[in-house]
Amino acid sequence: MSDQKFVLITGAGKGLGKAFATQCAGMGYNLVLLALPGENTPSLARHIQYQFGVAVFVYELDMCDEEQLSATLQEINEKYQVFFLINNAGIGGTASITQTSFQALDRIIRLNVKAGVQVTKSMIPALSRFKESYILNVASMAAFAPIAYKTVYPASKAFIASFSMGLREELKGQGVSVSILYPGPIMTNCNVSGRILAQGFVARLGLINTDAIARDAILKCLKKRARIVPGIWNRITAKLLEWLPVDTALHLISTSVKRELSYTF
């Protein structure tokens, strides 16, 4: 096993995961990156190694494959000392549930919920070996309220938020600090960008650069902040959702989200 300390990042091939990798490397941390095949992650790793002089190792796999993920996590535990876990991998989408295949919905649950729990459970023994270690679980602003035409996605992120807070309390005596990130809309690809723009002006208010989100989240996680909501507008929205009646919040958000329906799974 390497004597070096590593940050393990899931969903690291693009979007926010890629930003996490770059920001962590800029802070001098060695990396283990999990990403889907075909996302050019080995090229990203070579670029990060050249630019920042840190060690970077890549594992390409579909995290919905439980057996492959289990084998990969076992190898990571055997080879690397992981002191910081960033659970970023996730998937969403907007569509009427009657027009969505069960397979698409099931994939959201398997990746956002099951795989996230599997990674966390597998890495806790390694994290607990350090005097101080960290878990950053990426939820979403969608975790604050149910949303029509998304249904399963906000439910999956609400699960992650609840799971993380319970885990934070359970692990605090073991030196493992757990934080939750609630990012707002992020323009990670053309489809997602189109869906965000379709929602209109209000949705665009919550947009923040991915590198800014990643850096802020990492720094606050290392300071052991429990809940991290990037951006003033998103923090205002989170507060509003706390006191608005559920039916009112559901109607307001769902009306905006309905505009995304031309961007289906």
Image (cartoon, helix red, strand yellow):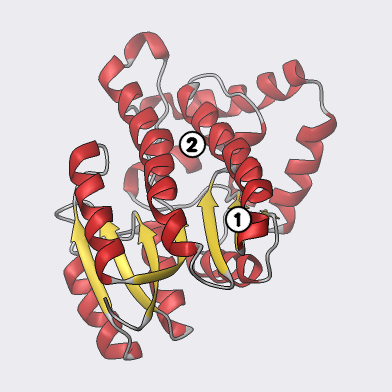
Q: Vertically, is 35 above or below 101?
A: below
Q: Residue at x 74, y 57 (%)?
A: 232
Q: Vertically, is 166 above or below 106?
A: below
Q: Which residue is mark 1?
A: 178
Quadrant that contains the N terminus: bottom left
Q: Residue at x 25, y 81 (%)?
A: 47
Which amino acid, mark 2? Ala
Q: Position of residue 43 (x, y in %)?
A: 18, 73
Quadrant that contains the C terminus: top left
Residue 198 badge:
2
Closer to viewer: mark 1 or mark 2: 1
Residue 122 badge:
none
**Label 1 Cα crowd, 10 Å radius (few <14 / some 14-19 / many 20+):** many
Q: Quadrant of residue 110?
A: top left
Q: Position of residue 157 (x, y in %)?
A: 53, 36
Residue 201 seen by the camera: no
Q: Is residue 250 left or right of residue 42?
A: right
Using the numbered discs, state the Cα–Cα distance from disc 1 to disc 2 in whole angstroms.
Answer: 34 Å
Q: Quadrant of residue 201?
A: top right
Question: Considering the numbered disc 1 on the image, is that residue within a helix, a strand or a loop?
Answer: strand
Going from the N terminus, do you reach mark 1 or mark 2 first? 1
Q: Position of residue 25 (x, y in %)?
A: 40, 80
